[in-house]
Image (tube, grey):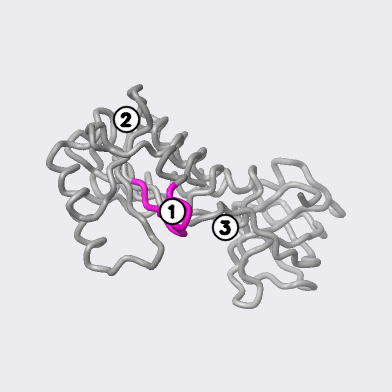
Amino acid sequence: MPAGPRFYCPVPLAPGITLDLPDGAARHVQVLRLQPGGAITLFGSTSPQFNGGEFAATVTAMGRQSVQVLVAGHDPVEREAARVLHLAIGIPANERMDWLVEKATELGVATIQPLMTERTVVRLDAQRAARKLAHWQSIAVAACEQCGRNRVPVIHPVLPLARWYQLRTSVPPAQESVALVLSLQRQSHDLREWTGTIQGQNAQSVTFLCGPEGGLGRAEETLAIAGGHLPVSLGARVLRSETAALAALTLLA
């Protein structure tokens, strides 16, 4: 791991340049009371030449509201999961979604799709949904800064489950991709056993769908299975939705 604290810096980065950090990173540097000469690490570059990886940098000047740094070498290191993981989940109640986004990011999820389902308790109008989306994305950024990931997962805008189904079925699935749905039906496959099958071992991309508290409605689950989602279970115990999602990601990562 690199020396010094890590900061998300979604601007074009390259060795040898001097730049003012974006407002969020600058505030974080100031909160940590770093001084000129302090070593930090930057990630999230939008440069086509240096997309991914991380940069060593040094603080060169501190202003009241700005921080200037000198960018040094680029390390192309990545700390992603062995396969691409997509999580689609009925939004849990209270603040559980915040915790879920943080932990899913640490476990290596590539995208998170929050869903409104039959049993979703949380109700969001357009304005509140936009605020929630920005909040969840900031949680993902902070989790990447903490855990060492250099690619921030994408949190998609909230969608009704039926609309998400429509969008998925309108695009042909990628090769070696698999879609799973958490199900308590008897014919469900044990996820632990499935990961050891040829299909499970060869899957390069997995989409895991699970409902909120109470799970998906029967019609929703039937629609998912008819659309190609393989029903899977996590054993005999009934888990909270956020616990089930993280348990599945742990098995799939």
Number of residue marks: 3
Q: If you read the primary sequence from the N terminus, does the residue marked by circle 2 or circle 3 appear first? A: 2
Write down the residue under mark 1.
198
Write down the residue under mark 2.
93
Q: Which label sits on residue 119?
A: none
Identify which residue, 169 or 175, lies in the foreground. Answer: 175
What type is the residue that disc 1 sits on?
A: Ile
Q: Nearer the viewer, mark 2 or mark 1?
A: 1
Quote the CA–CA distance across marks 2 and 1.
36 Å
**Residue 75 falls left or right of residue 129:** right
In the image, residue 137 sits, relative to residue 202, either above or below, namely above
Which residues are the magenta region? 197-208
Disc 1 is placed on an element classified as helix
| Residue 238 lies in quadrant | top left
Q: Tell whether position 15 is magenta.
A: no
Write down the residue under mark 3.
151
Quote the CA–CA distance across marks 1 and 3.
28 Å
Residue 137's x, y, as percent?
46, 49
What type is the residue that disc 2 sits on?
A: Ala
Q: If you read the primary sequence from the N terminus, does the residue marked by circle 2 or circle 1 appear first? A: 2
